[in-house]
C-alpha cells in the first residue's frame, strides 16, 4: 500500500485531490488578477506593436484591435472568459497564441532544469548525509564551506566563469544554444544526442550549483538531528551496517524538509532559469519571458506567470503526496 | 558452578567534554553467568546506562572506552573490529532501550523492523522469518500478531511498543539481553506486566540479562545478583537477597530506605541527604562521604576498595555496615 490513509485510502486521496484542485483554481484566479493589474501599470503596450511613424488614427485603431481601448475591468473580463474557453490570448509580437509560444519552448527549459536538479540531488544528498553523520570530520567542514560558496556565488558570474574556462580557454564545451536535438513524441530534446549533452552541461551546472548547496545543507541539518535519535542507536544495537543506518534509518527520517526544498527549488528553476538561459542563449521559456518583457508583450507575460503559478501549485501538491509516502504519521485530509 | 558468560574487568569509559573529563564508568568489574539476571542499580548519572552501551561498543565521541576488558564468551569485545561487532550486536547481545516511544523507527512498519533483525543474524528465508516474527509477537503478548506486522509504531501504545522492542531484542536468539531502564517510561500498571514478560521470556530462552535500573524494588523482584553503582564506581555487589536484606554499603542502605512501604505508613520516608556530587570534580577519597552519616576522616583521604565484606557480598567502604546494623 503506497498511501497510508486509514481504512478508506483511495476515497481520502480523491477528496484531497479535489480539494487541492479547487485551491489551485483560487490561486490561479488570484495570480491572474495580480498579474493583470501589474501589467496595466507598466506602460501602454500599443507603442510596442506599432511602427514608429504611425499616425494617431493608426494608433487608435491598433488600440481597438488589441482591445486596449476598453476599461481595465472589461479587458480582464474578456481575458477571463477567453481563458475559460481555452484561449490564452495572442502574442502582440508573434501574432501566435501565447500558450503555443511558451509550450514550444518549455521542453528546452524543463530538460535543462531536470538535468540540473538531478545533478544537484545526486551530489548533494550523499554529501549531506556524510556531513550530517560525521559533523566533526575535516572533510565535512570542507563540504560545508564549499556549500556556503555555492549559495553565495551569483549564477551569472558562475556561468560566465564556466564559459571562460570551458569554452574560451580550453574550447572544450560549447557556450551557447541547444546543439543537436532529437525529436521524441513531438518534443525536441538535447539530452538524446552527444552534441546536445555537451551543450546542456554548462548551463545545467550553473543552474545546479545553488540548489545543490541548499539541498546539501538541508540534508545535513536533518541528518544531524536524526542521528541523535534513539532509533538510530537501536538500529546500531541490532548490528545494522553503517550504510544501512545512514540511508535507510537516517535519511528517510530526514527527508521531509529535503523534499520540501526540492519541490520549491524545482519550481523556482523552471520558472526563473532566465539568467542562465540568457547567458547560454538557451532557447527556453526564461529567455522568452525576458524578451517579452522588453517588447511589452503582455499576453505572453500573463500566460507565463500563470503557468508558473500552476507549476508551483502542482509541485506542491505532489510534494504533499510524497510526504505521506515518506512518513506514515502524515496523512492527507 | 555456573559458567561465566560476560566478565567485565576494570572498565573505564570517560567522556571528554568541554566542561572537563567525566569519568562516567571508572573501573567497574562484575560478571554475568549464563542464564542469570544481574541488576545494575544507582541514581541518575551513576554510569549505569554507559556500561550497557560500552558492552556493545556504542559509545560515541566525546566518549571513549579508556581501559578494561569486556570478555564475552571468552572473547574481548574491546578488541573487536566494527565489522566483527556487527555479528555480536543483535546476534549475541541485544539491547532494550528505556523509551519505547523513541526506540522504534517511525517510518517503518513493525514487521520490517523485526525482519531486519532476522535478516542480519539468520539465514532464514522470507516466509520463515515472517513466521518467526509472528510467533515472537504472540510470545510477547500482542494479539492479532499477523496484522500488526504491517502497523507503524505510532499506532501502538507505549506498553505495546516496549513489547515490540523486547520482541526484536529476543528475536535473533541473543544470549545476553541488556535492558536499559526498560519500564521507566511506562505506566506503573504496565511496568509489572512488562517485567514479568521479560523474566519469563528470558528464562524460557535460557538467556542472561543485565537489568539497568534506578529502582531497587524492581531489582529485588527480578535479579539474581545486584551491582550498585555510585559516581561511576561499583560500591557494592552481591546476591540480591544479601544486598537487599543486609547491605554493607551506607549508600545501598540509603537507597533501600527511600523505597516507600505501604505496610509501614507510620515511618517517614527516608532520603539520602545531599545530591550526587559533580562527577568532573571527584578527587581522592570516597565519593559518597559528603552524604554519608558514617563518614570519618579516612573517607576523605583514601578511596575505599571493593573488598569482600561477608560471604558473596563485596562493598567499597571503609566502615561497612555489619549484618546486625543492616
Image (cartoon, helix red, strand yellow):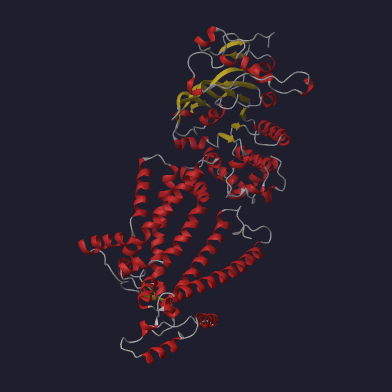
Camera-side residue of B202 and A75: A75
Residue at the far left: name it. Answer: A169
Residue name at image x 50 percent, y 52 percent: A255
Position above or below: B69 against B87: above
Residue B4 appears in the picture as rendered: yes
Count of number-bearing discs: 0
Quadrant showing the C terminus of chain A: bottom right
Quadrant showing the N terminus of chain A: bottom right
Residue at the far front: name it. Answer: A56
Snapshot quadrant of residue A52: bottom left
Residue B319 is left or right of residue A93, and the answer is: right
* Residue B292 on image: x %, y %: 60, 14
Camera-side residue of B231 and B49: B231
* Residue B128 on image: x %, y %: 62, 47
Residue name at image x 60 percent, y 21 percent: B227
Residue B167 is left or right of residue A60, and the answer is: right
Residue at the far bottom: name it. Answer: A57
Position above or below: B247 against A110: above
Snapshot quadrant of residue B322: top right
Camera-side residue of A148 and B303: A148
Residue A186 appears in the picture as rendered: no
Position above or below: B67 against A243: above
Residue B87 is left or right of residue A143, and the answer is: right
Snapshot quadrant of residue A91: bottom left
* Residue A306 on image: x %, y %: 48, 72
* Residue B175 on image: x %, y %: 59, 32
Position above or below: B149 against B32: below
Amino acid at each position: 500500500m503506497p498511501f497510508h490513509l486509514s481504512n478508506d485510502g483511495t476515497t481520502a486521496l480523491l477528496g484531497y485531490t479535489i480539494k487541492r484542485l479547487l485551491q489551485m483554481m483560487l490561486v490561479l484566479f488570484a495570480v491572474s488578477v495580480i498579474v493583470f493589474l501589474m501589467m496595466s501599470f507598466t506602460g501602454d503596450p500599443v507603442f510596442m506593436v506599432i511602427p514608429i511613424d504611425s499616425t494617431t488614427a493608426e494608433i487608435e485603431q491598433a488600440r481597438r484591435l488589441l482591445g486596449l481601448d476598453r476599461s481595465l475591468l472589461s479587458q480582464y473580463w474578456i481575458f477571463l472568459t477567453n481563458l475559460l474557453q481555452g484561449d490564452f490570448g495572442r502574442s502582440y509580437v508573434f501574432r501566435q497564441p501565447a500558450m503555443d509560444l511558451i509550450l514550444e519552448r518549455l521542453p528546452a527549459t524543463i530538460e535543462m532544469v531536470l538535468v540540473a536538479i538531478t545533478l544537484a540531488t545526486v551530489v548533494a544528498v550523499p554529501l549531506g548525509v556524510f556531513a550530517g553523520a560525521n559533523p566533526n570530520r575535516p572533510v565535512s567542514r570542507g563540504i560545508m564551506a564549499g556549500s556556503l560558496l555555492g549559495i553565495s556565488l551569483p549564477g551569472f558570474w558562475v556561468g560566465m566563469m564556466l564559459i571562460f574556462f570551458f569554452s574560451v580557454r580550453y574550447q572544450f564545451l560549447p557556450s551557447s544554444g541547444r546543439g543537436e536535438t532529437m525529436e521524441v513524441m513531438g518534443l525536441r530534446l538535447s539530452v538524446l544526442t552527444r552534441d546536445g549533452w555537451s551543450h546542456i552541461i554548462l548551463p545545467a551546472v550553473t543552474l545546479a550549483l545553488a540548489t545543490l548547496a541548499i539541498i546539501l545543507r538541508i540534508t545535513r541539518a536533518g541528518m544531524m538531528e536524526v542521528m541523535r535519535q534513539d532509533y538510530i542507536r537501536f538500529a546500531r544495537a541490532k548490528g545494522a551496517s553503517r550504510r544501512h543506518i545512514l540511508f535507510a534509518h537516517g535519511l528517510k527520517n530526514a527527508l521531509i524538509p529535503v523534499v520540501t526544498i526540492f519541490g520549491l527549488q524545482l519550481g523556482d528553476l523552471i520558472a526563473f532559469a532566465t539568467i542562465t538561459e540568457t547567458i547560454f542563449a538557451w532557447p527556453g521559456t526564461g529567455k522568452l519571458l525576458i524578451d517579452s518583457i522588453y517588447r511589452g508583450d503582455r499576453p505572453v507575460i500573463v500566460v507565463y506567470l500563470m503557468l508558473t503559478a500552476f507549476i508551483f501549485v502542482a509541485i506542491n501538491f505532489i510534494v504533499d503526496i510524497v510526504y505521506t509516502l515518506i512518513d506514515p504519521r502524515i496523512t492527507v485530509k | 558452578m555456573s559458567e561465566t558468560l560476560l566478565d567485565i574487568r576494570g572498565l573505564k569509559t570517560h567522556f571528554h567534554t568541554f566542561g572537563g573529563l567525566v569519568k562516567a564508568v571508572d573501573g567497574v568489574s562484575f560478571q554475568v553467568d549464563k542464564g542469570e539476571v544481574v541488576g545494575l542499580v544507582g541514581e541518575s548519572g551513576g554510569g549505569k546506562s554507559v556500561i550497557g552501551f560500552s558492552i556493545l561498543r556504542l559509545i560515541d565521541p566525546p566518549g571513549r572506552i579508556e581501559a578494561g576488558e569486556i570478555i564475552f564468551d571468552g572473547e574481548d569485545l574491546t578488541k573487536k573490529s566494527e565489522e566483527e561487532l556487527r555479528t555480536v550486536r543483535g546476534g549475541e547481545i541485544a539491547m532494550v532501550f528505556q523509551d519505547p516511544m523513541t526506540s522504534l523507527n517511525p517510518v517503518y512498519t513493525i514487521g520490517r523492523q523485526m525482519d531486519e533483525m532476522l535478516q542480519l543474524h539468520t539465514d532464514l528465508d522470507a516466509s520463515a522469518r515472517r513466521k518467526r516474527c509472528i510467533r515472537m509477537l504472540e510470545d510477547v503478548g500482542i494479539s492479532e500478531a499477523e496484522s500488526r506486522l504491517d502497523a507503524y509504531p505510532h499506532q501502538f501504545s507505549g506498553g505495546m511498543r516496549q513489547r515490540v522492542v523486547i520482541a526484536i531484542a529476543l528475536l535473533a536468539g541473543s544470549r545476553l539481553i541488556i535492558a536499559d531502564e526498560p519500564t521507566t517510561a511506562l505506566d506503573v500498571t504496565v511496568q509489572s506486566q512488562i517485567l514479568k514478560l521479560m523474566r519469563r521470556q528470558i528464562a524460557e530462552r535460557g538467556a542472561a540479562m543485565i537489568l539497568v535500573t534506578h529502582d531497587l524494588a524492581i531489582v529485588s523482584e527480578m535479579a539474581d545478583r545486584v551491582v550498585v553503582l555510585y559516581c561511576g564506581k561499583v560500591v557494592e555487589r552481591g546476591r540480591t537477597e544479601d544486598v537487599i536484606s543486609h547491605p554493607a554499603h551506607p549508600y545501598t542502605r540509603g537507597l533501600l530506605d527511600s523505597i516507600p512501604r505501604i505496610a509501614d505508613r507510620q515511618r517517614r520516608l527516608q532520603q539520602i541527604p545531599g545530591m550526587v556530587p559533580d562527577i568532573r570534580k571527584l578527587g581522592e577519597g570516597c565519593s559518597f562521604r559528603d552524604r554519608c552519616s558514617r563518614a570519618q576522616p579516612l573517607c576523605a583521604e583514601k578511596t575505599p576498595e571493593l573488598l569482600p565484606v561477608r560471604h558473596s557480598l563485596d562493598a567499597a567502604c571503609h566502615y561497612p555496615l555489619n549484618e546486625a546494623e543492616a
